[in-house]
Amino acid sequence: MKSFAVIRADSAVKVHTALLDLRRYGRIAFAGAPKIISSDYADDILTIVLSTPLRNRCYSAAVVSLNTIPSVAIGKLSKIHPPAHIIIISPKHEIFNELKDTIDSFPEFKVQKSGELEESGHKVSGNYSIVLS
């Protein structure tokens, strides 16, 4: 693992789409499965990394470890337009070691082909689905 991507969005559907976009269009290699994190924790990470007050809260969030060098991940991310706010965390950020030590304790955010996405009792048709374990 060389870096982390923290994905913040308005919904799990947007987090899911952003994860797919990172792989498909950004060609960013994941070092492990994406993990669900609380929206409050994702907001805290943003304020720590940017050292600025939070403007907008998120309602769904995930973190994924990357096999991509942070500068390369940032460059690739700038060329795609995912429907979520994505923060690349490198070893130079103080939160990096905390994420490295705790990522295995978070529940998995599974992306599966074929199925339906169920969020808050609503089903959304699509080619992919998320299984929250």
Image (cartoon, helix red, strand yellow):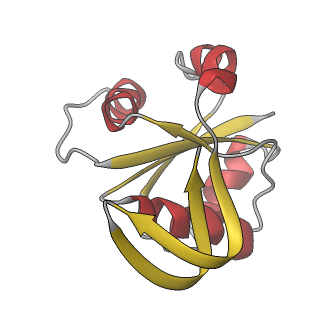
Residue 18 position in % (x across, y down) = 53, 65
Please count the marks in the image: 0
Q: Compared to 120, does 65 lie above or below? A: above
Left or right: residue 109 versus residue 45 is right
Q: Quadrant of residue 77?
A: bottom right
Q: Quadrant of the N terminus?
A: top right
* Residue that sits furthest to the front in the current view: 121
Q: Quadrant of residue 89?
A: top right
Name the residue at 29% across, 49% down: 59
| Residue 26 visible, this angle | no
Across and down, in percent, residue 22 comes to 65, 64
Q: From what the image shows, is residue 25 above or below residue 36? A: below
Picture coordinates of residue 46 (x, y %)? 37, 35
State the residue in front, 58 or 28. Answer: 58
What percent of the width, then of the height, locates residue 25? 68, 76
Q: Is residue 65 left or right of residue 106?
A: right
Residue drawn at x 19%, y 31% as measured from the top left: 53
- For image coordinates 59% across by 56% down, the residue present is 131
| Residue 109 seen from this side | yes
Q: Which of the two residues, 20 or 69, is positioned nearer the viewer here?
A: 20
